[in-house]
Amino acid sequence: MRIRLSHLAALLALTMVVTAVAGVVATYREAGDELRDVLDDDLESQSRLLARLLTAEPGQLSADGLTTLLRKTFKPDEEDTLWVNVYDSAAGRFASNLPHDLPLEDSRNRKLRLKLGGHAWEGFQRREGDLVVQLLRRADRYGEVGEEILEEITMPVLVGGAVNLAL
């Protein structure tokens, strides 16, 4: 049985393409999962911090003052809009950086999924006494960042693979 050099080269090229594609897919999935974990941990810790800050000096801000503070601090933008809600059941106050009239649902849940303005939002809420702080991020941002990661991973692999195949 004779093995031709051209068959061996074709097999090597095919192996390189398959491993490059498998590497991109595996890296993309792992990077996406890690990114989501980091962003979720960030939202959770920010909601905890905000809840603790607001309960440290209860009643210092009126509902209007708190709404103004939230709207100045968490301004909507195209990159990464955060949605912040603060419900105070004892004082009957409510404040948010985005206008809405959604009532507080179940304050025992840590993870949230809400809809506002035609978008799905995901995030966390933290209860500190009578105060519930919700911090959410638009769910489609995870996909957009994932696409950016895929572009950044794919280009170097394609260029490197093309050079390898040419050689």
Image: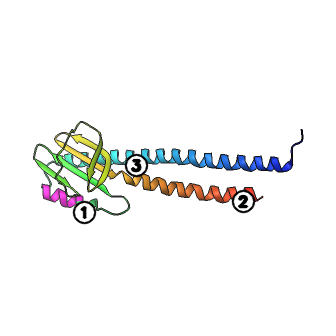
Q: Report how far apart the C-alphas of labels 2 and 3 lie in the structure.
A: 36 Å
Position of the N terminus, as image quadrant, is top right
The reply, left or right, for residue 107 in relation to residue 92 is right
* Residue for badge 2: 163
Q: Which residue is at a point 32% across and 46% down the rendered structure image?
A: 123
Callout 3 amino acid: Leu
**Span of residues in magenta:** 62-70
**Residue appearing at x 57%, y 44% in the figure:** 26
Badge 1 element: helix
**Which quarter of the figure has residue 97?**
bottom left
Closer to the camera in the image, 141 or 87: 141
On screen, 91 above or below 106? below
Task: Calculate the distance from the C-alpha at mark 3 to the C-alpha at mark 1.
Answer: 22 Å
Residue 38, x across and y down, in percent = 43, 47
Q: Position of residue 76 (x, y in %)?
A: 30, 62
What residue is rendered at 14% in x and 53% in y? 60
Q: Which residue is mark 3?
A: 39
Q: Which mark is residue 72?
A: 1
Q: Nearer the viewer, mark 3 or mark 1?
A: 3
Q: Secondary structure at mark 3?
A: helix
Of 162 and 63, nearer the camera is: 162
Amino acid type for the residue under numbered disc 1 = Lys
Q: Residue furthest top?
A: 108
- Secondary structure under tag 2 reads helix
Q: Earlier in the sequence, mark 3 or mark 1?
A: 3
Q: Earlier in the sequence, mark 2 or mark 3?
A: 3
